[in-house]
Amino acid sequence: MITEILQSFIKPSRKADSSTTTGINREAHPRWDWINPTCILLLAVSGVFFIYSAQLNSQDPPQWDNQVIWIFLGIIVYLVVSSIDYDIYMKYGHWLYVLTIALLLAVLVIGAERYDARRWLDLGLLNYQPSELAKISVLVVVSSILARSEIGKIKESLTALVKVGLVVLFPMVLILAQPDLGTSLVLIPMVLGLLYVSNLSMRFFTTVFLSCTFAIGIAMWDVHRYFNFLESNNYTPTSNLGVYEEHSYLPYLKDYQRNRILTFIMPDEVDPKGSGWNLNQSLISVGSGGITGKGWTEGTQAKLGYLPRSVAHNDFIFSVLAEEKGFLGSILVLSITGILLLNGVRIASKARDRFGMFLAVGVTTIFTIHAFINIGMTIGMMPITGLPLPFLSYGGSFLLSCCMLQGIVQSIYRHRKAF
């Protein structure tokens, strides 16, 4: 039933560009784009070194060796995905979407719980985070819908928007229920990026901008009421978790999320020994690195535990890097990441059809959002959301997801149309 509905969603429009349909005789290029895997390997290997350094004096078992194993598995995933013609995602993407919904439902029922969140499936040898698969499946299905629709005419555009909205809604609601606000919010800019390159009317984006501005205003009003609630009842952010939610008018915001927003706005006044502590220590790490840094394994913030060891190797890996390799090392990593992103845009421009173009743009948007938010939160420009830094942060599910996404980009390049 679900798959039939999805198949009807991505059914080609009669007036759609014929180049978006499958089964067309195209000449594939076996050549590889070496910029893509070179940047990935440089970032992934660098990540192992800084994960090792972040946990050097930790009493917990080291995880850098696990990251090495994940990298080897990621290489296999990358090679397999890049060797497959991406047309297969147009044909069977709805099955991937159904699998994603099933796994997200399973997480809510039997998922492993950590830090008051239920986001992982315990598979014995490893824990898997299905929300990572949601990024891929939503990207594939939305790209299929847009590639097979004639965007521009009012009727076709509205039909496509309704389909896209429904496809995004279900996984987003399930991810929010875990709760995982950061991952769910990645889906929104990804879809907006796809809609933008689909030549949708600018009136739509104006409406979205105004709606987002209104939603942010409502959220800030809610956070203001929350802060007044804390002060009037002599609560601290950590002792109040769950109390204010009973009086909230915005049930999609949890108290720990309100705390993160308040920490971003006033880190020294709100929870200075909790979330505010992480931000302040991150700023010290980044600032104390200077131009060239203190040297690998010589950073004191993570080594002495000021930058909490529970987050130093994943969410705040950039802070460790900036302290040990300084401004120059940070710029080098940012440059490699930038090259990877620009190369994704280049490959999108070379795609043989609209579907390939949408996939490459979507992947590039996902990586851009992750890098921007992660680095932004370590330097106080963005709220702390828990989004990892691609290929550098520790995490098996995220690394495999990144390898699969970049493998799709490589597939688009390898199977591009001959000129």
Image (spheres, rainbow, N blue to C red):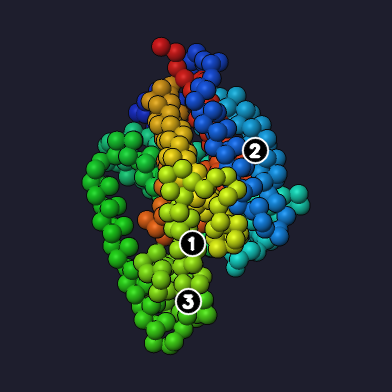
Residue 174 locus on image (x, y percent): 54, 58
Q: Nearer the viewer, mark 2 or mark 1?
A: 1
- Mark 2 / mark 1, whichever is N-terminal: 2
Earlier in the chain: of badge 3 and badge 2, it is 2
Label 2, label 1: how far apart the Cα atoms are: 29 Å
Check whether the beta carbons of the residues at disc 3 and disc 1 lie within 8 A of each other. no
Q: Quadrant of residue 354?
A: top left
Q: Residue at x 70, y 45 (%)?
A: 66
Q: Nearer the viewer, residue 145 or 348?
A: 348
Residue for badge 3: 237
Q: Position of residue 232 (x, y in %)?
A: 39, 87
Name the residue rendered at 50%, 50% in the picture: 323
Secondary structure of the residue carrying numbered label 2: helix
SS for callout 3: loop
Residue at the spot of label 2: 71
* Residue in the picture at 33% in, 35% down: 197
Q: In x, y percent, where is residue 346?
A: 40, 26
**Residue that carries the numbered disc 1 in the rendered image:** 281
Position in image of residue 78 (x %, y %): 60, 31
Circle 1 SS class: helix
Q: Which three-letter amino acid code belongs to the residue tagged 3?
A: Pro
* Amino acid under disc 2: Ile
Q: Amino acid at mark 1?
A: Gln
Which is more N-terminal, label 1 or label 3? Answer: 3
User: How far apart are the two marked residues, 3 and 1, measured between alpha carbons?
Assistant: 19 Å
